[in-house]
Image (tube, rainbow, N blue to C red):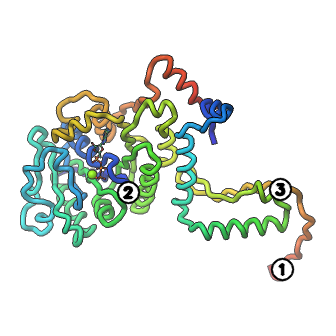
Amino acid sequence: MAAETRYILICSGKGGVGKTTLTANLGIALAKQGVRTAVLDADFGLRNLDLLLGLENRIVYTAQEVLAQTCRLEQALVKHKQQPNLALLPAGNPRMLEWLTPDDMKTIAAMLGDLFDVVLIDCPAGIEDGFKNAVAAAREAIVITTPEVSAVRDADRVIGLLNTEGISPIQLVLNRVRPKMMANQEMLAVSDVTDILALPLLGLVVEDEQVIVSTNRGEPLTLNGANSPAAQAYTNVARRLRGDDVPIVDPSQERQGLRAKISRLMNTKIF
Amino acid sequence: MSLTLRDAINRLLGRQPASASTAKQRLQLVLAHDRSDLNPELLQQMRREILEVVSRYVELDLDEGDVSLATEDRVTALVANLPIKRARDVVLPAPAAGA
Ligand SMILES: Nc1ncnc2c1ncn2[C@@H]1O[C@H](COP(=O)(O)OP(=O)(O)OP(=O)(O)O)[C@@H](O)[C@H]1O
Ligand SMILES: [Mg+2]
């Protein structure tokens, strides 16, 4: 039995900023690091987590049958073949949304607590019922955003709601960073986003084509030791989450060469 | 407020500021409003009344003055920047009886 299971919500407000990709990669990375991890797809309307993990053909039961007590939790959990420390609890069908309550989510979370050290909850976009259900199962949260005004604004809204719900800690992952644009001040800087949202930074993921390739295959980047920048970033997020002190490198400050140097000089604050 | 060397050069050359600076400023403004959850009409009324009260004591430069929302570290503040032209000769009212 797990001593103290961590229930971590992965949310953003705005859709399509990388919640499910982070959940899948973080789930695999934690499992590889020896953490018994469950990923709970709380996006009942538009489920995707199964697809990103390559588990879509192995789903027999869902959270719905578990709640209705027509199957046991163990029957609904889909274990990952290569990383048996990881299991997916699939969402039910969209019609579930009509009757699912925050209490149902708490019931599921409590059941998972008996088997896992960490439960990652993939939150739907928005702040309506689906979000409220997902929050009910969580104690802490990772807010993921991209360095764009609309995503940051929606993240701010979500952080306000998480604060009211007493979720803590809340940490930030900044996704789809384009170092060159950032260096040229054509994209919000890392410090701009952390200042505005006033959250500690848990990780920084650059825009990486390999993310799309891995999605096509249903094999998260963290699965096969891929060494792409995003793969490393996700692995580092997992390590920081477990308390390892892994420094965060700002890729817009990293680039070498004269152009990069001039660019950095131009970004120095003079006033 | 902060200004980078790039912003300064852009300003000198009459160019638009880099879009990240604009993005940050716009976000800070919109978040001040989002976080306070004040409706714009109420804010406008509050602004009028604040100017009214202050104008009883000092003559304000109304073209320059501004009462607005600002936000930092998730705390929203009402910031009044009211340039004073001159003080008025205000007779202090006698304290109300019983107060
Ligand atoms: N770092 C990255 N680099 C490149 N592409 C990325 C990155 N992160 C996410 N993407 C792409 O962005 C898209 C949206 O990602 P994802 O499905 O994880 O977002 P989401 O927040 O779960 O969306 P939704 O709100 O619809 O659930 C996907 O096509 C994914 O491949
Ligand atoms: Mg998703």
Asked if badges 3 and 1 are on one and the same chain, I answer: yes
Q: Amino acid at mark 3?
A: Ile
| Residue at the spot of label 1 | B96
The residue under label 2 is which amino acid type? Answer: Ile
Amino acid type of the residue tagged 1 in the rendering: Ala
Whichever of labels 3 and 1 marks the residue nearer the N terminus, that label is 3
Label 1's element? loop
Check disc 1: other Cα within 10 Å, few if <14, some if 14-19, many if 20+.
Answer: few
The tag on residue B84 is: 3
* Ligand 1 in which quarter: top left
Whole-percent x and y of residue A109? Answer: 22, 59
Residue sticking out furthest to the top: A258
**Mark 3 or 2, which is nearer the eye?**
3
Label 2 resides on the chain identified as A
* Residue matched to label 2: A167
Q: CA distance from mark 3 to mark 1?
A: 28 Å
